[in-house]
Amino acid sequence: MAHPQGKYADFEGLREQAVALRRRGYSLRQIRDELKIFNNDILNQLVKGEPPPEWTKRPNAKDDLKAKARELRLQGWTYDQIEAELGCSRSSVSLWVRDLPKPASRYTPEEHRELMQAGLARLRTAQDEERKRVKEGASQEVGELTDRDLFMAGVALYWAEGQKSKPYQRREVVTFVNSDPAVIQVFLAWLELLGVGRERLGFRVMIHETADVARAEQFWAALVGIKTSDLHRTTLKKHNPKTVRKNTGDSYHGCLVVRVRQGAELYCRIEGWWNGIAAGATARLR
């Protein structure tokens, strides 16, 4: 059956032999060696249309996954569930089961909404826990607060939130307004560090007229350690019926105004301190 290398004049005769060998279970390599056909193109043409024997086929690693995916789909599983269960891609799942009927929904619309809401609740809980962890870690990074730390923080806090003198309206007074109880306490601790006695401080509540004014006065008086009768007259903000207030509820206490009596000199020092901080920060940028 041998023939001169590179010459295949009797193609039909070779094809008959190649097909016969193929049907007897020969692999392409075995046919090549038997017929001495070393040209792959010719070899493939000789056996064209003849399927390879089963023993030559490589097993498909995904055959088991495909069978399992189809089984799960017939049980009513969704694409997402099959993907998560088998650890394969969604495109593979779709390819394997797309000829199967879509399973009927296992949940009513109301149950779907409840499941979504429960999932969102779990997500928000996890996010809240992560925020709490980050905040607690950051708080520990501050460490012990030194006098200088408090001094610098107080200067920056006042310059951000306190009343400042304007070129067109010169008012060298120390007045601080804020709605955050923690901010008020930091400011009071700062004044104490500066040697400003409580006898020099005046307190006044500012709040919306539709809020619980008496409750707010009690809250702020307790925070700063005075009687409600020691508060100056509360400033009420008029209600605009065209607006919808969002600062409502038990957590709303309005703002507390803290004023330092005879504070002109202190104000000038605060402005000077801030100018020093700003100049130092600017120099670092150069």
Image (tube, rainbow, N blue to C red):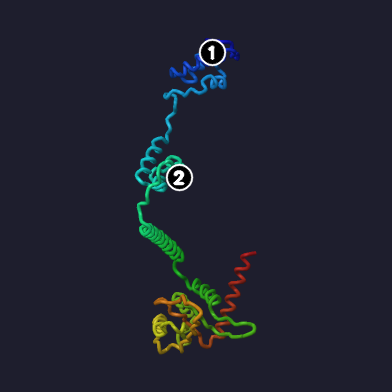
Q: Position of residue 47 (x, y in %)?
A: 51, 20
Residue 118 visible, this orientation: no
Q: Which mark is residue 28?
A: none
The alpha-carbon separation of the residues under discs 2 and 1 comes to 49 Å
Residue at x 39%, y 42% (from the top left corner): 86
Above or below, 73 against 198 in this view is: above
Mark 1 belongs to which amino acid?
Gly
Q: Is residue 95 left or right of residue 169?
A: left
Residue at x 41%, y 76% (from the top left corner): 251
Q: Position of residue 153 (x, y in %)?
A: 51, 73
- Image quadrant where residue 273 sits: bottom right
Secondary structure category for the residue under label 1: helix
Labelled pair 2, 1 in contact (Cβ < 8 Å) = no
Above or below, 249 against 21 in this view is: below
In this view, the mark in front (2 or 1): 1
Residue 37 visible, this orientation: yes
Quadrant of the rendering where the C terminus is positioned: bottom right
Which residue is tagged 2? 90
Q: Position of residue 160 (x, y in %)?
A: 55, 75
Which residue is tagged 1? 13
For marks 2 and 1 on the same chain, the one whose residue lies earlier in the sequence: 1
Q: Position of residue 54 (x, y in %)?
A: 42, 25
